[in-house]
């Protein structure tokens, strides 16, 4: 599994002066943004705290049967579990287990963990993953999340390499609605990428992994924290000139470009060159990208923030009016009436076929822990949470509505005709892939159909085809 279930978070704060820093208008930008000194994270440490406790607090690890391993990292594991007691008995969940001692070594990781739990409780939306329970033992934190058996959008993109425009339109619509809701709640997502988008059993998208979100943001709020994934990161984050909600619209533009072409708009063999491209290079499109798609992406990827589409007070509404979305009925999007372009091939609620077999083949085991809360590790007061019964009612209504839904096929703005046969569609996809390979202006780093490596973060437990390269500086830090 990739970033959704990557539990490395960040290594301990290490800062190295480097001659390899990029000079932009006289300002030095370190090649490795994760290696900023702790002072760079003071705003998160001061503003995020949990001072409340919802629910009975009686739910614990003993109420869940561990079925499979979904992900593993230096900070813990993610398991597929079945609830065996009380409400939701028999229901399948994803259980994220984090070791407190590892998290507390790094203040920003503590803040990110609290932020994720905070946001998951506060935000309920059709295209955002749901939190059902949160609890802690003496040495561990547990988040019980909705299990989305369709896996990651990243895995689907890796298989397809690129998407047809109408398929891209479907995912952009759902992601746009999720980001709009977060912004209305005063939250900047800041980490949009294919790895953080999960698919449910029908193929609808859901945002997950809220560890890098920024809370309590007003329309005019500017923050300076350096975070996110390099290839999808807005220039104002890289230059530390302060950023607001518009960074999510840059990331949406980068993701849209990625879906249409098979690679992010700006990437290179290392972080330094990738950052330089994001800040300075011209945006280039393959010839098969339509005019409306090009125009929307260009407007989302404008470097001057005040010129970027969606940067004004209208936020997402300004984006929705773009001609790329002229065929879209937004009420149908929100009610999930649109037919997803891809339906995951899963057979049951506990199907793990869409997840990395490297993890699902592991012996599912969570080491025992005492139930007492040690004072030295009790930095997470109020962590406990039990979802409201209204969450179950919402799912019952949704499942009833979707049992035989009036599925609508979403057409792109420049594709007014009904979809052709699967044979024709497959032929079009093959043609697009061939066209892309002949386009010298685009990256050609794909190997055997896999999506390119990225240069953003250290990943320790990754399948071989989805791994990411270590930078030299990161390897030095790992072994020091």
Image (cartoon, helix red, strand yellow):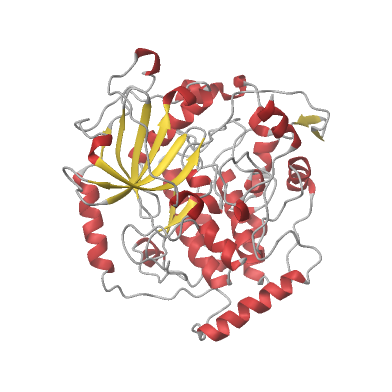
The answer to which quarter of the image holds residue 297 is bottom right
Residue at figure coordinates x 31%, y 25% from the top left: 382
Residue 349 lies left or right of residue 447; in this view the side is left
Q: Nearer the viewer, residue 476 or 20?
A: 476
Q: Is residue 10 visible?
A: yes
Q: Is residue 241 visible?
A: no
Q: Residue at the far left: name it.
A: 86
Residue 260, above or below 137: below
Q: Residue at the far front: name it.
A: 363
Quarter of the rendering occupied by the C terminus: top right
Image position, residue 163 (x, y; %): 58, 69
Residue 38, above or below 65: above
Q: Nearer the viewer, residue 238 or 353?
A: 353
Residue at figure coordinates x 31%, y 59% from the top left: 349
The answer to which quarter of the image holds residue 164 is bottom right
Residue 107 lies left or right of residue 475; in this view the side is left
Image position, residue 65 (x, y; %): 27, 44
Residue 126, above or below 345: above
Image position, residue 356 (x, y; %): 50, 54
Residue at figure coordinates x 62%, y 80% from the top left: 428
Q: Residue at the far top: name it.
A: 375
How many numbered marks does the figure carry?
A: 0
Residue 77, above or below 433: above
Image position, residue 470 (x, y; %): 69, 40
Q: Nearer the viewer, residue 36 or 352?
A: 352
Residue at figure coordinates x 49%, y 22% from the top left: 45
């Amino acid at each position: 599994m990739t970033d959704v279930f990557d539990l490395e978070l960040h290594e301990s704060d290490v800062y190295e002066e480097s001659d390899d820093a990029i000079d932009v208008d006289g300002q030095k930008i370190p090649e490795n943004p994760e290696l900023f000194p702790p002072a760079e994270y003071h705003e998160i440490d001061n503003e995020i705290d949990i001072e409340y406790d919802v629910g009975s607090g009686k739910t614990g690890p003993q109420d869940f049967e561990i079925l499979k391993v979904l992900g593993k990292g230096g900070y813990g594991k993610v398991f597929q579990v079945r609830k065996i007691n009380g409400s939701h008995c028999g229901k399948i969940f994803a259980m994220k287990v984090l070791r407190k001692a590892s998290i507390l070594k790094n203040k920003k990781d503590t803040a990110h963990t609290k932020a994720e739990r905070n946001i998951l409780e506060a935000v309920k939306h059709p295209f955002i993953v749901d939190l059902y329970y949160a609890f802690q033992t003496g040495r561990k934190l547990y988040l019980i999340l909705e299990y989305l058996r369709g896996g990651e959008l990243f895995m689907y993109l890796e298989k397809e390499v690129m998407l047809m425009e109408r398929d891209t339109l479907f995912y952009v619509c759902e992601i746009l609605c999720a980001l709009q809701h977060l912004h209305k709640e005063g939250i900047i997502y800041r980490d949009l990428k294919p790895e953080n988008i999960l698919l449910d059993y029908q193929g609808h998208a859901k945002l997950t992994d809220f560890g890098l979100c920024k809370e309590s943001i007003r329309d005019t709020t500017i923050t300076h924290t350096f975070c996110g994934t390099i290839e999808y990161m807005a220039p104002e984050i890289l230059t530390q000139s302060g950023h607001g909600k518009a960074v999510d619209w840059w990331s949406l533009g980068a993701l849209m470009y990625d879906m249409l072409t098979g690679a992010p708009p700006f990437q290179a063999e290392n972080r330094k060159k990738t950052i330089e491209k994001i800040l300075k290079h011209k945006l280039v499109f393959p010839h098969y990208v339509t005019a409306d798609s090009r125009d929307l992406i260009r407007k989302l990827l404008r470097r001057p923030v005040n010129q970027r589409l969606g940067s004004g007070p209208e936020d997402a509404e300004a984006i929705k009016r773009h001609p790329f979305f002229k065929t879209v009925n937004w009420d149908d999007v929100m009610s999930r009436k649109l037919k997803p372009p891809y339906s995951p091939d899963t057979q049951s609620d506990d199907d793990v076929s869409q997840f990395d077999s490297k993890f699902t083949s592991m012996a599912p085991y969570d080491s025992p822990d005492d139930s007492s809360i040690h004072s030295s590790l009790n930095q997470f007061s109020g962590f406990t949470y039990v979802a409201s019964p209204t969450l179950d009612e919402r799912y019952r209504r949704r499942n009833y509505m979707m049992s035989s839904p009036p599925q609508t096929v979403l057409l792109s703005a420049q594709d007014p005709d009904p979809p052709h046969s699967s044979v024709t569609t497959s032929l079009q996809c093959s043609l697009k892939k061939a066209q892309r390979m002949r386009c010298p202006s685009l990256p050609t780093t794909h190997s055997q159909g896999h999506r390119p490596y990225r240069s953003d973060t250290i990943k320790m437990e990754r399948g071989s085809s989805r791994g990411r390269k270590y930078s030299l500086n990161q390897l030095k830090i790992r072994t020091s």
